[in-house]
Amino acid sequence: MKHLLDIESLDADQISNVLALSAKMKRQRGIHPDAPLAGECWVMLFSKSSTRTRLSFEVGIRELGGQPIFLSAAEIQLGRGEPIRDTARVMGRMAQGAVIRTYAQGDVEEFARLSGIRTINALTDAEHPCQILSDLFTITEKRGSLVGLKLAFIGDGDCNVARSWIWAAAHLGFDLRIASPKRFQPPEELIRRAGGNITVTADVCAASDGADVLYTDVWVSMGKEDEAAFRAAQFGGYQINRATLDAAGGAPLVMHCLPAYRGKEITDDVFEAHAKTIFDQAENRLHTQKAILALLKK
């Protein structure tokens, strides 16, 4: 593959290749004699703020021998109205790759098409592919396999993270349950198009029953800040807490893609009890994104 634009367009073999190389990258961190990005400059074009995404990509590009150049929208002409198609055609003549974190999925796709350089979606409103590939790697580390996996996503079922989980479940065949208020459930058309064993419900306990993984994300995604009060009222019962753990039974992994707002989508005590998994999950963004960078074809 030349680009990573979404989970939807990947297949099971491509996902498996990313996970296998992620494990190797983690085992051999600091040992990259071939330096696959040697002599390359990668532009990091971020219209949305970030902690983990920026840090993991900057470190990863450097560890693979490349040079990252970070540009926020406010620093370049995009912030003054230059269209993405013009920015793409300029950057494509100067850089070897781009990592883009922005709002519209169409902007990332247009950039990839017109720039001609390797392009990675580091988050859009539609998908968050790097996060989900990293999470799949974390689950394989902890469980040994994705076979028979039951994952419960609790919260905003129509956010970018949930949408990427839908496509991952469709491609890999695991059991995904999404628990969201009716207003925030993914469109039925998307579930039909994805196929797979995907259940959508408003019942947190039903979604959590027997789950191997309990997963949540913030209730208020970037760009939705004006809905914060309304969302808080809608999502009040959609939380990973002791009752959710009891509903799952056994010893489920608890995962959060961070940042976490304790007392909202997850309680502080549950977060701290599962902090090892959550911060392993955060670290694995580095190893998985290095695998993605190394696998993209020039």
Image: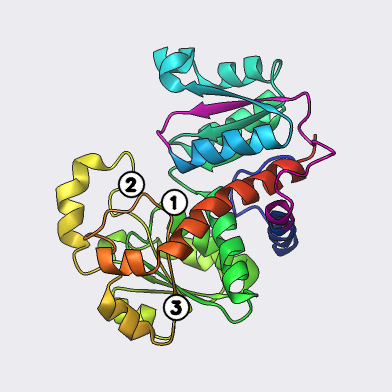
Judge depth for marks 2 and 3 and give the one in front. 3
**Label 2 secondary element:** loop
Q: Residue at x 40, y 18 (%)?
A: 74
Q: Is residue 22 magenta?
A: no
Is the residue under label 1 in contact with that under label 3 (CB below 8 Å)?
no
Q: Is residue 149 found left or right of 249 in the rendered image?
A: right
Q: Vertically, is 251 above or below 102?
A: below
Q: Vertically, is 116 above or below 154?
A: above
Is the residue under label 3 in contact with that under label 2 (CB below 8 Å)?
no
Q: Residue at x 64, y 32 (%)?
A: 112
Q: Quadrant of residue 271?
A: bottom left
Magenta part of the protein: which range? 24-50
How many angstroms separate mark 3 from mark 1 (CA)?
23 Å
Q: Is residue 132 found left or right of 295 in the rendered image?
A: left
For disc 3, the marked residue is: 252
For disc 2, the marked residue is: 221
Q: Residues within 10 Å of mark 2 (few under 14, many from 20)?
A: some
Query: Where in the figure is residue 78, as x and y percent of width and height?
Result: 46, 17
Predominant secondary structure, magenta span: loop
For disc 1, the marked residue is: 160
Q: Which mark is residue 253?
A: none
How many angstroms separate mark 2 from mark 3 (CA)?
25 Å
Q: Residue at x 28, y 54 (%)?
A: 219
**Label 1 secondary element:** helix
Query: Where in the figure is residue 252, as x and y percent of width and height?
Result: 44, 78
